[in-house]
Amino acid sequence: MGITLTQQAADHISRYIEKRGKGLGLRLGVRTTGCSGMAYKLEYVDEPAPGDQVVEQFGVKVFVDPKSLPFLEGTQLDYGREGLNEGFRFSNPNEKATCGCGESFTV
C-alpha cells in the first residue's frame, strides 16, 4: 500500500495517542461530502476493523478501510504549521481538484 507518513505527522500522532492514554493508531479514510465530493476523515483506532490495511512508519500505525484505499493510494500524510494554523496536510496524487475552502476534493 502506497500511503506514507512524514516524521512530523508520525510524531504528532504518537504524541496525541500518548496524551489520550490508549489507541493503536490513526484511521485515514474518505467520506462523501462538500462541494467537490470527497473529504478526508481521521479518527483514533482502538480496535482494527475487518479488512483494514495497515501501514506502519516511524513506529506509528495508520489504518485504511478497503473502500477508501483506491482514493488514497500514493498519499503522503504530513503535519505542519503555517502562520497561526497547524494541522494535517494531504499530498494525494489522485486529487484532480479541490474546493475553494479546502475542505473537499475530487478524483
Image (cartoon, rainbow, N blue to C red):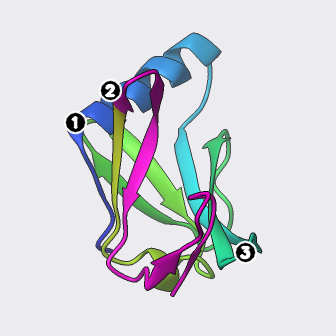
Q: Residue 7 has which mark? A: 1
Q: Which residues are magenta?
A: 81-107
Name the secondary structure under disc 1: helix
**Which residue appears at 48% of the width and 80% of the height?**
97
Q: Residue 63: x percent and y percent?
A: 52, 57
Query: Disc 2, disc 1: CB below 8 Å?
Result: yes
Q: Is disc 1 surrounded by few (<14), some (14 to 19) or many (20+) residues within 10 Å?
A: some
**Which residue appears at 36% of the width and 39% of the height?**
60
Q: Residue 35 has which mark? A: 3
Q: Is disc 3 surrounded by few (<14), some (14 to 19) or many (20+) residues within 10 Å?
A: some
Q: Which residue matches tag 2?
A: 11
Query: Disc 3, disc 2: CB below 8 Å?
Result: no
**Residue 8 appearing in the image:** yes
Q: CA distance from mark 3 to mark 2?
A: 32 Å
Q: Is residue 71 left or right of residue 6?
A: right
User: Looking at the picture, does residue 107 appear above or below residue 75?
Assistant: below
